[in-house]
Amino acid sequence: MAVLVLLCIFLGNAPAFGDVKVSIADGFDFPVGKPDAAGYYKARGLRLRSPTHFGEDWNGRGGGNTDLRDPIYSCANGVVTFAHNVRQGWGNVVLIRHAYRDPSDGKVKYVDSLYGHLDAIHVKVGQKVKRGDQIGTMGTNFGMYPCHLHFEIRYNLSTGMQRNSVPSDYANWADPTQFINKFRRLSREWRSVSVPTGTYKEYQGFKGL
Ligand SMILES: [Zn+2]
């Protein structure tokens, strides 16, 4: 009986490894001007101290809103874990979960990439994407900001839309450009891997995968 109770507690708290399988990433590209961010520049970078900025802002070199509705691409193979207009300061947000093999220790690891303030979302929760697939278009959060892409890479799979629920440190937050440059090319593997699902808390009534 005790074993059964413990098992239930364990299963209740552990992230579920469902039957969602993704192609392991064969590398990471920039989400604009694929694959090298040609025609774009990073207007703001990662900042983990107050005032925090948990990712990067990418803008077109043309200035102003000349980049409005430019294509936004998935930075790697993965599965869409969130795709909703959550309004407020975010607007349209897409999160994608990626599995990749870290060459430094040979282990399969996971990260989430986030794409914010999109003008339009072209993917659905649960949809599998490849590196370079268009997932939406660059936007202004419906007029709240000058057009740009807000882009994050998170090591902590529980973060979701609750950014304040995880410590503001490098264990949870990747510097996106550094991460992409580090894992630019990974060896291709002809297999899929299961990814954790059910790791996000519901946000404003919106659910993830
Ligand atoms: Zn930003």
Image: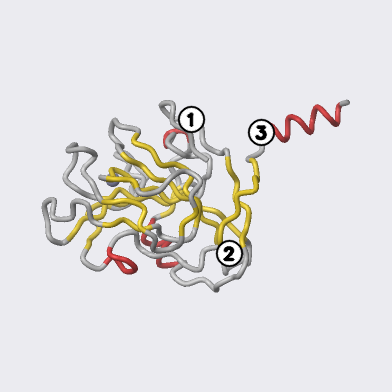
SS label for mark 2: strand
Marks 1, 3: nearer the viewer = 1
Looking at mark 1, is its residue's CB closer than 8 Å to ligand 1? Answer: no
- The answer to whether mark 1 and mark 3 are in CB contact below 8 A is no
Task: Name the amino acid type tagged 2.
Answer: Arg
Q: How many marks?
A: 3
- Image x and y of residue 154, in percent: 46, 49
SS label for mark 3: helix
| 201 over 186 or under it: above or below | above
Image quadrant holding the N terminus, namely top right
Question: Circle 2 is placed at which residue position?
Answer: 101
| 113 over 163 or under it: above or below | below
Q: Marks 1 and 3, Cα distance to the nearest angstrom?
A: 16 Å
Task: Name the amino acid type tagged 3.
Answer: Asn
In primary-sequence order, the first of circles 1 and 2 is: 2
Question: Circle 1 is placed at which residue position?
Answer: 202
Q: Residue at x 35, y 33 (%)?
A: 86
Question: Circle 3 is placed at which residue position?
Answer: 13
- Image x and y of residue 200, in percent: 52, 36
In primary-sequence order, the first of circles 1 and 3 is: 3
